[in-house]
Amino acid sequence: MARPASPTLTKSEQAILEVLWERGEASVREVADELSKQKPVAYTTVLTMFNILGKKGFVSHHQEGRAFIYRAAITREEARQQALDHLLSQFFQGSPNLLAQHLLQDHDIGREEIRALRNKVNDARARGRK
């Protein structure tokens, strides 16, 4: 039995979208050629991944001659937001606070990063007062 599709991007799907975000649009062949610069990938594998991305609503396409030309249907920021929302709901009970506590407790965060986070918190507070 086939496993259900991941609601978020897999590493392979993200690699394809990275090419599309960089180029704007591309054919299956162009994406396969680009990905093969890192490690060999079959045209049919990329085609299958495009079909999955299409079903998930992450890409759209149009036809030019015999080729389908694909374009990302979501931005990098939207993909990040979807991944973060999934991470929050799956591991942190939907709480950004729990995620932030985990990051601060279990990861080495330098003074500059903490200062930047503090500035973001202060900015958010200021916006909340308006």
Image: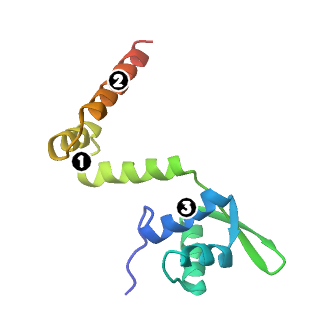
Q: Relative to 43, is 112 above or below?
A: above
- Which quadrant would residue 17 be assigned to in this image? bottom right
Residue marked by disc 3: 18
* Count of numbered tags: 3
Residue marked by disc 1: 92
Frontmost of labels 1 and 3 is 3
Helix, strand or loop under label 3: helix
Where does the N terminus fall, quadrant-wise?
bottom left
Nearer-the-camera pick, 11 or 55: 11
Q: Residue 14 appears at what percent x and percent y?
A: 49, 64
Helix, strand or loop under label 2: helix
Is 101 displayed left or right of 113 in the figure?
A: left
Residue marked by disc 2: 119
Q: Residue 45 appears at what percent x and percent y?
A: 54, 83
Q: Residue 3 appears at what percent x and percent y?
A: 37, 79
Point 53% across, 83% down: residue: 41
Residue contact between numbered discs 1 and 3, judged by CB atoms under 8 Å: no
CA–CA distance between discs 3 and 2? 30 Å
